[in-house]
Amino acid sequence: MQSFAPIERRKVYELVADQLVSQIGEQHLRPGDPLPPERELMQRYQVGRSSVREALRMLESRGLIESVGNGSFAVAGYANPLNNSLQLLLSLDQASMHDIYELRRIVECEAAALAAGRRGDAHLLRMDEAIEDMAEGLRTEGGDRYVDADLRFHLAIAEATDNGVIVHAMRAVRDVIRRALIEIFPIPGAPERSLEQHRTIRAAIAEGAADRAREAMRGHLFSVESKVNQTLGAEEARG
């Protein structure tokens, strides 16, 4: 008897995101081109505002689009070669998640300290929006919204350094670690603790406390790496 695969149920915002990815992939939208405003996307795809916003958040978290201010987005530049290199190293077992988190501590702890001295109001606003979305993401299944917001928070810190190389590195690392973060989302209490750690980091940056921001980021990354190792260890034990 022929077997049939179950029909996958897709969320509306995922379908909207797929449509936009197709537009980008077919080069109807090129790097630097502005995306249509929210209202136009709602009319074009016959969906609600929340679905459009979730689709835009998803594409931004994947680095396909970038914010240009005032709630508007443009198509991002072409693929980050550093991201491709990290993915290749992981696939060839020439790097581990420990290596990735060691890199994160080197880059992000100092980024937090720099952000404390260089951040503007717009950077703090993006951090606040990300934290708010993380809180909302605690009430949704799967962890996608929470993780995407988590990664946006860290990218906002990188942008607050006013250092393009740090932003480039953070975007590459973000794409590599997304799957690991999705895996640890179901661990009881883990996302709630991480959310509070993000709030502590944000507070230190807002107050211009560079040393405190650095140490708060260091503690957060050690905590997350511990959870990642816990999850990976459990997967290996299951064979």
Image: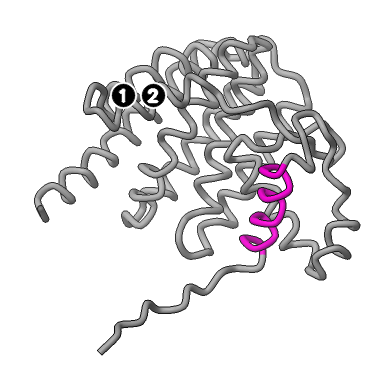
Residue 119 drawn at (x, y percent): 70, 17
Instruction: Judge by depth and name the residue closer to the eye, 201 or 108.
Output: 108
Residue found at x 70% / y 29%? 124
Circle 2 Cα neighbour tier, 10 Å, few/some/many (<14 / 14–19 / ≥20): some
Q: Quadrant of residue 162?
A: top right
Instruction: Specify how the rendered protein is coloured.
Output: one colour
- Residue drawn 66% across and 62% down? 13
Kindly state the secondary structure of the residue where label 1 is placed. Answer: helix
Say above or below: 229 vs 16: above
The residue beneath circle 2 is 86
Instruction: Give the vertical position of 147 relative to 203 (above or below).
Output: below
Contact, CB < 8 Å: mark 2 with mark 1? yes
- Residue under the image location 41 percent in, 21 percent down: 85
Residue 15 is covered by the magenta coloring = yes
Is 212 located above or below residue 51 in the figure? Answer: above
Q: Which residue is tagged 1?
A: 89
Residue 157 image label: none
Q: CA distance from mark 2 to mark 1?
A: 5 Å
Q: Find the magenta span and give its range.
A: 13-26
Q: Is residue 44 left or right of residue 176?
A: right
